[in-house]
Amino acid sequence: AQSVTQLDSQVPVFEEAPVELRCNYSSSVSVYLFWYVQYPNQGLQLLLKYLSGSTLVESINGFEAEFNKSQTSFHLRKPSVHISDTAEYFCAVRTQGGSEKLVFGKGTKLTVNP
Amino acid sequence: DSGVTQTPKHLITATGQRVTLRCSPRSGDLSVYWYQQSLDQGLQFLIQYYNGEERAKGNILERFSAQQFPDLHSELNLSSLELGDSALYFCASSKRGSGGTNEQFFGPGTRLTVL
């Protein structure tokens, strides 16, 4: 079985500061990795994903995440956050070649203050 | 807008009752997934349908059931409701039943409140 741990339930930062949201996973088989974002009163949107290839993946709005197989981590980073980045962020895994179900972490609430 | 629609947006009902949540997938998507988001359990996979057939099952209670119809929309039926069933229920859809690039697109959710 797979599990995902998001180490911080809440992360407050000031605007234009860098941020890192941590995600570690556990799995006995190879997985695909995802970050989803949930804005207030909205559904989940895919932010970025790692399927294969380069271990550093980027989103269109400046976020990036690095897959580290030895540390079983997929931390999300942004060098300079905006007020509009305030949302809840979910890390998820899906097994390669197995069930399509996504296994999610508990989420990290990012609050960007002026 | 992901293209996945869910109705109703909000549902308030009483314990012991039965409700039906509806999901219409994106045009062309054959798979539908149901997830439950609650404060204590977080986001949990319930069930997947692919082209009308059940494909995978997660932590879905026996009081809950789902189906996917020939037009590919799906319904999640929740019966004998308990207070603990109060949650946000998400539907997601994807083009295929499986595969690495088989991205799931999520709907806005149905918020169920059981009083």
Image (cartoon, helix red, strand yellow):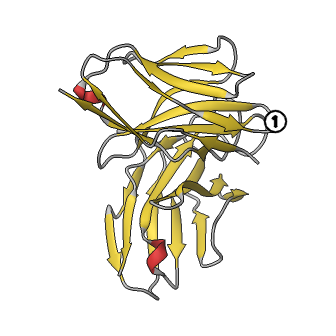
Q: Position of residue B38 (x, y in %)?
A: 46, 61
Query: Is A3 on the left-hand or right-hand side of B44?
Result: right
Marker count (numbered): 1
Q: Position of residue A96 (x, y in %)?
A: 76, 34
Q: Amino acid at mark 1?
A: Val
Residue closer to the observer: B4 or A39: A39
Query: Is A21 on the left-hand or right-hand side of A56?
Result: left
Q: Position of residue B85 (x, y in %)?
A: 48, 73
Q: In the displayed structure, would residue A111 be above or below residue A54?
A: below
Task: Say which residue appears at 25% left-offset and 29% top-offset.
Answer: A84
Residue closer to the observer: B57 or A3: A3
Say whether residue B72 is visible.
no
Query: Is A21 on the left-hand or right-hand side of A74?
Result: left
Residue closer to the observer: A6 or B85: A6
Task: Say which residue appears at 26% left-offset and 22% top-offset.
Answer: A82
Say whether residue B83 is visible.
yes
Q: Secondary structure at mark 1?
A: loop
Image quadrant occupied by the C terminus of chain A: top left
Q: Which residue ends up furthest to the bottom in the rendered image?
A: B16
Task: Say which residue appears at 27% left-offset and 30% top-offset.
Answer: A112
Q: Which chain letter matches label 1?
A: A
Q: In the displayed structure, would residue A109 be above or below residue A61?
A: below
Q: Position of residue A31 (x, y in %)?
A: 72, 32
Q: Quadrant of residue A91?
A: top right
Query: Is B6 on the left-hand or right-hand side of B81?
Result: left
- Find disc 1 in the rendering and name its residue: A29
Q: Which residue ends up furthest to the left in the rendered image?
A: A114
Task: Say which residue appears at 62% left-offset and 30% top-offset.
Answer: A33
Q: In the displayed structure, would residue A52 be above or below residue A39?
A: above
Q: Quadrant of residue A111?
A: top left
Residue closer to the observer: A69 or A102: A69
